[in-house]
C-alpha cells in the first residue's frame, strides 16, 4: 500500500511535469513480426528534449513514448469497465485478485486517494506500476508536436512521415483527453505545455466546459485523420499504429458520448461551475448532437469498409463441424482472432494472456486451478440479459416461459452442441441465442476449442463444488457459476503446459461502430430512419445466428410493434449493444452515459450457490452483494483531495 507522503511527492512532481518541460525518459517500442506485432515499451537512456529531436531514430522513440500511455484494457485488472459495474464479479475476500475497480462496484470509492485514478496515475489507473498518469501522456504528446512541427528539427525525417507522426500524436493527445473526460466529466484541456517557470495563474489550470472540450478534441481527431494512413501497409513492423478508420471511429465514440443523456442536457450537473463562475455542463438538451454523432459514425463506417474492414466470420476452421459450433466461433473469434478484418483498432501494447487465464476454467481433473483460474464470474443478471433462441429478450418471448430458474432440465440430442447430452442444468441455460453459448460457460456447457478437432462435444464444463471446474480452490474460484468463454482464443490448450494465444486487445470493432451508428441515427431521426437502423442491427444479428429485428419481434415478442417507435427501437438498440459488447468493458460506460446506473447499479448481485455439491444445493440463487450507486455523485470520479490543494482553480465533482 502506498503511503500518503509518497503519493503527495509524486503528485507534486507530476503536476510540474504536466505543465512544464524539463527532462524526460524516452521509451522505445520493439515491433515484432506480424504474428506477434505487439508494441513492447522498454526503457531507453535518459536524455534531454534537445537531443530527442536531432535525428529520426530518436524522434521515433519519443513517438512511441506517446503510445506507451494507452491504457492496458486487455488486462482485466486495469480495464475499468470489466469489474466496476455489475456484469462480472469476483470474490469479495479478494484472495484471487486485487482489483481497485471492484472497489467501485462495491460502492467504496473515495475522494482521498481515489481508486483507478487516471488523473494522477495511481491505484491501477490505466496500467501497472503507477506508470500511466494520462496527463503525463498528454504532456509527452505536446512535447512531440511542438518539436516535430518545427521543420528545423529532425532533418532526416521525410515530410510524408513527419505528417503521419504528427497525426498519430494528435490522435493520442485527443484520446487521452477523451478517456479522462469519460471518467471525470469536465477536465483541464492541455492545448500546449506551460513553461515550468510560468506564473501560477498559467500553471493552475481550470476545468473547461464539456461542449468546448468536445469541439477541441473533434478538431484534433479531424486533423489526425487527414494525416493517417487508411491501412497499415507494413504489417511486419507497424501493426498497432493508428489508422484513419481508428481516428474517425474514436471521434464517433466521443460524439456519441457527448450526445448521450449523461453529457447532453444533464440538469443534475447544472451546479458544477468553475471557480470563475463558468458552467461546466450545458443543462439544455441539444438534439443536434445526435445528428453530429450519427454523421461521424457513418463516416467512420464508410472509411473502414472502403479499406477492407468487415463483420468477421471464421471461414478457415479446417475441421468438419456443425453450424452451431461455426456460429460460436464467428462470435468469439471476432474478438480474439489476431488482426482480423473486423478490428478497426487493436492495442498490441496490452496483452491478453493473463486475462484469458483469469477467465478460463479447468476442463479435466488433470488441470491445475492456477492454470485456468476462472475467477472472472459473469453475474446471473448478465446471463439473463441474453436473448432467447428467437432473438428477443427472455421477458418478452411469448413462446417460451422459463418460470422458476432453479428448476432443472435434461439436455437431449437436440441440445448436444451447447449442453452435454443427458446433463441436467437450469432451465435458464436452454433455448438461448448463440451468443449466450459462445460467450458464457456454465455447469454442463460444451466448450468447443481447436484441440477438440471435429469432436465438438468433447469438452464439457462441470462446475459443482467437487467437480474439476468447481470452486474448491482456496484462492482461484468462480463466485457465480458462470464463466467467460468469449475472451478466450479457441487455440487455448492444456497438456504439456497450459497455453493461451495472445491477441491485441480490440479497442474498436466494426460491430461497435454499427451499433453506435444505429443508436445515434435512431435518436437523430427516429422512425424516419428505421430501415437504415435495422440494416446495421441485422448485420450483427446475422453473424450471431439470429433473424432480423422485424422477424424476431413480429413473430416472437409480446410487444411485436416495439421496433416501430423511436423509444422502442432505443430499447432494442441498448439491449443489442449490451449483448454484442458483453465482457469487453464497454457496457459499464454505456450504462453511465445512458444515465441508467441509478437503476442498474443499485440491485443485488446474484449467482448460483457455487459451493453446492449436488444439483439441489448448487442450483440455489444466492445474493453476493447489494450494490450502492449514489447519483449524481457516482457518475463521475472524484478528483484527489491533494490535487485540489495543489491547484485551487480546480473544482471537485458534485457529491464528493
Image: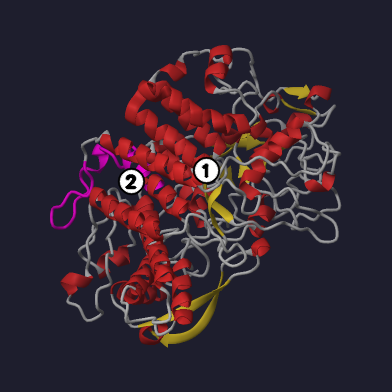
Secondary element type, mark 1: helix
Q: Residue at x 47, y 36 (%)?
A: 515
Distance in Å between CA atoms under marks 2 and 1: 33 Å
* Left/right of residue 167 with respect to residue 537 in the rendered view: left
Q: What main secondary structure does the magenta stretch of the protein show? A: loop
Residue 57, how many percent across, how many down? Answer: 48, 80
User: Height in image: 554 above or below 312?
Assistant: above
Q: Position of residue 460 (x, y in %)?
A: 81, 39
Query: Circles 2 and 1: CB distance less than 8 Å?
Result: no
Magenta includes 419? no
Front position among marks 2 and 1: 1
| Residue 86 visible (yes or no) | no
Q: Is residue 254 magenta?
A: yes
Say which element carries label 2: helix
Give residue 222's quadrant in the image: bottom left
Q: Earlier in the sequence, mark 2 or mark 1?
A: 1
Question: Alpha-carbon neighbours of circle 2 within 10 Å: few (<14), some, or many (≥20)?
Answer: some
Q: Which residue is mark 2?
A: 633
Q: Which residue is mark 1?
A: 510
Residue 505 spot, x, y in % from top left:
57, 55
Q: Could you say which quadrant of the image residue 34 lies in?
A: bottom right
Residue for point 58% across, 40% down:
311
Residue numbers of the magenta segment: 253-282
Amino acid at each position: 500500500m502506498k503511503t500518503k507522503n509518497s503519493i503527495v511527492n509524486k503528485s507534486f512532481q507530476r503536476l510540474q511535469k504536466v505543465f512544464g518541460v524539463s527532462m524526460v525518459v524516452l521509451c522505445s517500442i520493439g515491433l515484432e513480426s506480424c504474428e506477434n506485432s505487439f508494441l513492447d515499451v522498454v526503457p531507453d537512456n535518459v536524455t534531454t528534449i534537445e537531443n530527442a529531436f536531432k535525428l529520426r531514430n530518436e524522434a521515433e522513440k519519443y513517438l512511441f513514448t506517446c503510445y506507451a500511455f494507452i491504457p492496458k484494457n486487455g488486462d482485466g485488472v486495469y480495464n475499468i469497465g470489466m469489474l466496476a459495474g455489475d456484469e462480472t464479479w469476483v470474490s469479495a475476500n479478494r484472495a484471487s485478485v486485487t482489483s481497485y475497480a471492484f472497489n467501485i462496484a462495491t460502492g467504496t470509492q473515495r475522494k482521498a486517494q481515489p481508486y483507478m485514478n487516471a488523473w494522477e496515475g495511481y491505484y491501477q489507473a490505466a496500467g501497472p506500476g503507477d506508470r500511466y498518469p494520462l496527463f503525463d501522456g498528454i504532456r509527452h504528446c505536446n512535447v512531440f508536436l511542438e518539436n516535430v512541427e518545427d521543420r528545423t528539427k529532425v532533418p532526416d525525417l521525410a515530410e510524408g512521415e513527419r505528417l503521419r507522426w504528427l497525426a498519430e500524436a494528435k490522435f493520442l493527445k485527443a484520446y487521452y483527453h477523451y478517456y479522462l473526460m469519460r471518467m471525470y466529466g469536465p477536465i483541464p484541456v492541455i492545448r500546449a505545455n506551460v513553461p515550468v517557470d510560468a506564473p501560477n495563474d498559467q500553471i493552475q489550470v481550470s476545468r473547461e466546459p464539456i461542449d468546448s472540450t468536445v469541439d477541441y478534441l473533434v478538431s484534433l481527431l479531424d486533423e489526425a485523420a487527414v494525416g493517417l494512413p487508411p491501412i497499415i501497409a507494413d504489417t511486419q513492423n507497424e501493426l498497432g499504429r493508428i489508422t484513419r478508420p481508428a481516428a474517425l471511429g474514436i471521434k464517433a465514440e466521443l460524439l456519441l458520448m457527448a450526445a448521450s443523456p449523461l453529457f447532453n442536457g444533464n440538469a443534475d450537473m447544472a451546479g458544477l461551475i468553475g471557480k470563475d463562475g463558468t458552467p461546466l455542463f450545458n443543462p439544455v438538451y441539444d438534439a443536434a448532437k445526435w445528428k453530429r454523432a450519427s454523421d461521424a459514425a457513418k463516416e467512420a463506417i464508410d472509411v473502414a469498409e472502403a479499406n477492407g474492414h468487415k463483420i468477421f466470420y471464421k471461414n478457415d476452421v479446417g475441421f468438419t463441424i456443425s453450424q452451431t459450433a461455426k456460429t460460436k466461433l464467428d462470435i468469439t473469434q471476432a474478438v480474439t482472432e489476431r488482426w482480423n478484418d473486423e478490428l478497426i483498432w487493436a492495442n498490441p501494447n496490452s496483452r491478453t494472456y493473463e486475462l484469458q487465464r483469469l477467465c478460463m476454467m479447468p476442463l479435466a481433473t488433470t488441470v491445475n486451478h492456477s492454470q485456468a483460474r476462472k475467477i472472472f464470474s459473469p453475474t446471473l443478471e448478465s446471463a439473463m440479459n441474453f436473448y432467447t433462441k428467437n432473438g428477443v429478450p427472455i421477458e418478452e418471448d411469448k413462446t417460451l416461459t422459463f418460470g422458476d430458474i432453479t428448476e432443472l432440465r435434461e439436455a437431449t440430442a437436440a441440445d448436444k452442441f451447447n449442453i452435454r447430452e443427458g446433463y441436467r442444468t437450469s432451465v435458464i441455460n436452454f433455448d438461448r441465442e448463440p451468443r449466450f453459448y459462445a460467450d458464457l460457460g456454465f455447469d454442463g456447457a460444451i466448450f468447443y476449442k481447436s484441440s477438440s478437432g471435429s469432436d465438438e462435444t468433447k469438452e464439457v464444463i462441470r462446475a459443482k463444488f467437487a467437480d474439476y471446474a468447481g470452486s474448491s480452490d482456496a484462492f482461484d474460484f468462480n463466485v457465480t457459476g458462470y464463466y467467460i468463454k468469449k475472451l478466450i482464443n479457441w487455440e487455448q490448450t492444456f497438456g504439456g503446459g497450459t497455453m493461451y494465444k495472445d491477441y491485441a486487445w480490440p479497442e474498436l470493432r466494426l460491430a461497435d461502430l454499427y451499433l453506435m451508428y444505429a443508436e445515434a441515427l435512431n435518436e437523430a431521426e427516429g422512425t424516419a430512419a428505421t430501415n437504415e437502423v435495422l440494416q446495421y442491427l441485422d448485420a450483427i444479428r446475422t453473424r450471431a445466428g439470429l433473424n432480423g429485428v422485424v422477424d424476431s419481434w413480429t413473430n416472437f415478442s409480446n410487444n411485436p410493434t416495439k421496433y416501430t417507435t423511436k423509444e422502442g427501437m432505443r430499447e432494442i438498440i441498448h439491449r443489442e449493444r449490451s449483448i454484442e459488447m458483453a465482457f469487453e468493458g464497454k457496457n459499464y460506460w454505456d450504462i453511465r452515459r445512458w444515465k441508467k446506473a441509478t437503476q442498474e447499479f443499485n440491485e443485488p448481485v446474484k449467482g448460483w450457490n457455487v459451493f453446492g455439491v449436488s444439483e439441489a444445493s448448487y442450483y440455489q440463487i444466492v445474493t453476493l452483494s447489494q450494490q450502492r450507486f449514489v447519483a449524481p455523485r457516482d457518475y463521475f470520479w472524484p478528483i484527489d483531495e491533494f490535487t485540489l490543494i495543489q491547484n485551487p482553480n480546480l473544482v471537485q465533482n458534485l457529491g464528493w
